[in-house]
């Protein structure tokens, strides 16, 4: 459960170094996973054996296949929601990396296909199209793999920004599920026809091990574990309460909720087990831990979040998580600056309540449009009063350009945002800074902090727009 | 990743790739495709000391051939050759004893192998020997698509040059090479 103020919190540069080392370590693992097959390929004379155009294309075809397979497995583990990886990098970073990797991965696999076709078409002296027809007509495994490639193209195309805007979430989600099929159908040709895997039992074992490892992680952590755990804890909606500014607090209770081990600032994927919503989880930040329950405060963004306001108490839910490194686990400094906008106040409120602090260590900046209609404002005010945090509630219209502070009034001295922020939070440069709000707002805040030379490692941003 | 770590990682990765590349070049020079002729002579002496009864492995038709031949081990890569050589040398025995029997006049013989069926089709060859030495091999059956046509030409040259099947793999055509070698062993047993 949430860390209390009396628990020991380790801070300092030693912790920072440890955190960075762990991150580097994970990234190096990724690099290693790609490097190993390339090295095996080179040692085996994969490139050295290339002596004419056809064999060059063939070598390239095999190399892109090996690198592509490694990348594909990395791509998958990134969204397997495995705790050991998530604790180090955070789910948003993992998801971001997954998104970034999608296109290059597809390009690699397309290059693999095309170079294979060109190579065989040169050595057989027939056209590329004929080669394609020969291959997919002659080998069932290649036909499957080709279908897999087409599915993968469909998945990536449906995920590019332009398509995401036009597609409903449901359509995108269903298409995205096809990626599992596309990966499965591509496996046979790798082991039945892949020169490298056939020739080098060690490399084949390596890839089988990777496949099994990634597969088990996905099946267990992404699918089975959350369901098993939630049913075992018999998690249910305890109460639903509307808050200011069209937000809703949902309290989830059950047996031993504390065994979920959530920290303030973290979030869960909430799956409400009703006929309409069971298949579609939503990420929600914990806003409080009242007496062995978990409370989410959710903004109404139309879609499913409006349905959530009508959930009946007693409805079973599945919680997947806790996720996120937007928590004290990444804090290394004594001073903390908490920046919240809109519904981003949910995790900020939880942090303000539980961060270990002496009076004056924590500064809270809460950006709202209208003070009289600000979600959880009374709670934030109470916490700051009780724990002696500095609180600045900034209301007012948005600035004309990009910015995260309210538009300056006619009489005010015109000042850049970083200067205004420094006036609110003098310790900003020596603080750990937690930012949660809409992404444009968060970006503007990060820009201002960069002007103040705040080290990157001290800025913690939770995006809820992914 | 921190800059320093990234630099060190890149350096290590680059050197690992360079070493791998060099190893690959050497592997290629020593192993793949055609073995240099000096490798052939120890193979023959090996063969002379091997039990002639071992030729029996080449006699049965394709499906019944020694499973060792289909083992992925005799493919490519430096560490694998030692294991590859002993399994293949026995097949040489028919050629060596044939030589002293031959009279001064050159004896030319041509025989066909059994059709060897394998994963991608069937391979059948005909072999011509002059005084027991392999001089010509023709493909009677063999699917020549996907670069296999090219592979056969390489394999025929390699077989004639080595007077047997004691040569490495063609990367990318592992199964075809195995099938071809089986066909050669099969036909050599008939002389």
Image: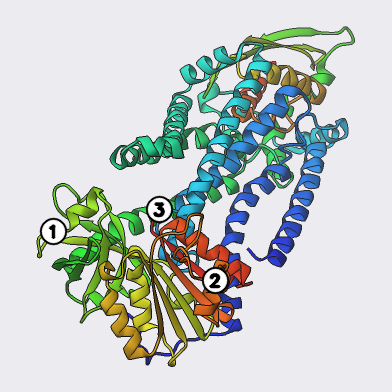
Sequence-wise, the earlier of marks 2 and 3 is 2
At numbered mark 3, what does the secondary structure look like: helix, strand or loop?
loop
Marks 1 and 2: in contact by CB < 8 Å?
no
Residue A171 lies, with reference to residue A222, above or below; the image says: above
The CA span between labels 2 and 1 is 48 Å
Q: Position of residue A456 (x, y in %)?
A: 59, 68
Q: Residue at x 17, y 72 (%)?
A: A254
Q: Residue at x 30, y 37 (%)?
A: A171
Which residue is the site of mark 1?
A311
User: Seen in the image, is A52 located left or right of residue A3?
Assistant: right
Residue A110 lies, with reference to residue A132, above or below; the image says: below
The CA span between labels 1 and 3 is 23 Å
Chain of the residue where label 3 is placed in the rendered structure:
A
Sequence-wise, the earlier of marks 2 and 1 is 1
Residue A433 lies, with reference to residue A437, above or below; the image says: below
Q: Position of residue A421 (x, y in %)?
A: 52, 73
Q: Position of residue B113 (x, y in %)?
A: 62, 14
Q: Nearer the viewer, residue A232 or B100?
A: A232
The CA span between labels 2 and 3 is 37 Å
Q: Nearer the viewer, residue A183 or A426?
A: A426
Chain of the residue where label 1 is placed in the rendered structure:
A
Checking the image for residue A413, the label placed there is 2
Q: Residue at x 51, y 84 (%)?
A: A335
Sequence-wise, the earlier of marks 1 and 3 is 1
Query: Do the residues at discs 2 and 3 belong to one chain?
Result: yes
At numbered mark 2, what does the secondary structure look like: helix, strand or loop?
loop
């Amino acid at each position: 459960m949430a860390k209390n103020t009396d628990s020991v919190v380790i801070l300092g540069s030693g912790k920072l170094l440890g955190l960075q080392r762990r991150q580097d370590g994970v990234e190096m693992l990724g690099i290693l996973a790609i490097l190993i097959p390339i090295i095996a390929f080179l040692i085996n004379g994969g490139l050295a054996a290339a002596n004419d155009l056809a064999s060059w294309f063939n070598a390239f075809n095999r190399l892109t296949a090996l690198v592509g397979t490694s990348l594909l497995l990395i791509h998958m583990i990134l969204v397997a929601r495995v705790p050991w990886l998530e604790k180090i990098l955070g789910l948003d970073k993992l998801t971001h990396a997954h998104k970034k990797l999608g296109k290059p991965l597809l390009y690699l696999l397309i290059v693999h296909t095309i170079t294979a076709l060109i190579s065989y078409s040169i050595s057989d002296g027939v056209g590329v199209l004929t080669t394609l027809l020969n291959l997919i007509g002659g080998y069932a495994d290649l036909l499957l793999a080709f279908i897999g490639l087409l599915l993968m193209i469909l998945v990536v195309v449906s995920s590019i920004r332009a398509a995401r805007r036009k597609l409903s979430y449901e359509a995108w989600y269903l298409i995205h599920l096809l990626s599992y099929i596309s990966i499965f159908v591509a496996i046979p040709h790798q082991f039945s026809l892949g020169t490298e895997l056939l020739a080098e039992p060690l490399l084949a074992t390596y890839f089988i091990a990777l496949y099994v490892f990634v597969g088990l992680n996905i099946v267990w952590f992404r699918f089975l574990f959350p369901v098993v755990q939630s049913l075992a804890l018999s998690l249910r909606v305890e109460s639903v309460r509307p808050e200011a500014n069209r937000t809703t607090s949902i309290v989830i209770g059950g047996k031993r909720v504390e065994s979920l081990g959530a920290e303030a600032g973290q979030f869960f994927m909430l799956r409400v087990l009703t006929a309409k919503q069971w298949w579609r989880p939503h990420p929600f930040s914990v806003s409080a831990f009242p007496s062995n329950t978990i409370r989410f405060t959710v903004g109404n963004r139309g879609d499913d979040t409006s349905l959530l306001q009508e959930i009946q108490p007693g409805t079973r839910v599945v919680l997947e998580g806790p996720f996120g490194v937007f928590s004290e686990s990444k804090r290394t400094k004594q001073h903390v600056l908490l920046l919240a906008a809109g519904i981003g106040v949910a995790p900020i409120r939880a942090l303000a309540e539980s961060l270990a602090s002496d009076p004056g260590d924590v500064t809270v900046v809460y950006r709202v449009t209208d003070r009289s209609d600000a979600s959880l404002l009374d709670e934030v005010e109470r916490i700051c009063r009780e724990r002696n945090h500095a609180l600045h509630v900034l209301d007012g219209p948005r600035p004309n350009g990009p910015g995260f502070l309210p538009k300056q009034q006619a009489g005010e001295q015109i000042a850049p945002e970083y200067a205004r922020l420094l006036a609110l939070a003098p310790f900003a440069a020596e603080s750990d800074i937690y930012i949660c709000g809409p992404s444009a707002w968060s970006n503007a805040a990060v820009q201002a902090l960069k002007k103040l030379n705040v080290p990157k490692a001290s800025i913690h941003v939770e995006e809820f727009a992914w | 990743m921190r800059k320093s770590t990234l630099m060190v990682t890149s350096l290590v990765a680059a050197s690992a790739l360079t070493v791998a590349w060099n190893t690959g070049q050497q592997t290629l020079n020593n192993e793949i495709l055609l073995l240099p002729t000096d490798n052939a002579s120890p193979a023959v002496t090996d063969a002379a000391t091997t039990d002639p009864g071992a030729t029996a492995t080449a006699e049965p038709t394709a499906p019944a051939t020694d499973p060792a031949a289909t083992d992925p081990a005799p493919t490519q890569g430096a560490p694998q050759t030692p294991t590859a050589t002993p399994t293949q040398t026995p097949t040489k025995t028919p050629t060596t004893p044939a030589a002293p029997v031959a009279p001064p006049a050159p004896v030319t013989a041509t025989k066909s192998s059994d059709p060897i069926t394998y994963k991608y089709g069937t391979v059948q060859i005909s072999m011509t020997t002059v005084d027991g030495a392999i001089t010509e091999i023709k493909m009677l059956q063999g699917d020549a698509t996907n670069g296999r046509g090219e592979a056969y030409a390489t394999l025929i040259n390699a077989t004639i040059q080595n007077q047997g099947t004691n040569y490495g793999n063609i990367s990318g055509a592992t199964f075809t090479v195995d099938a071809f070698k089986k066909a050669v062993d099969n036909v050599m047993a008939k002389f």
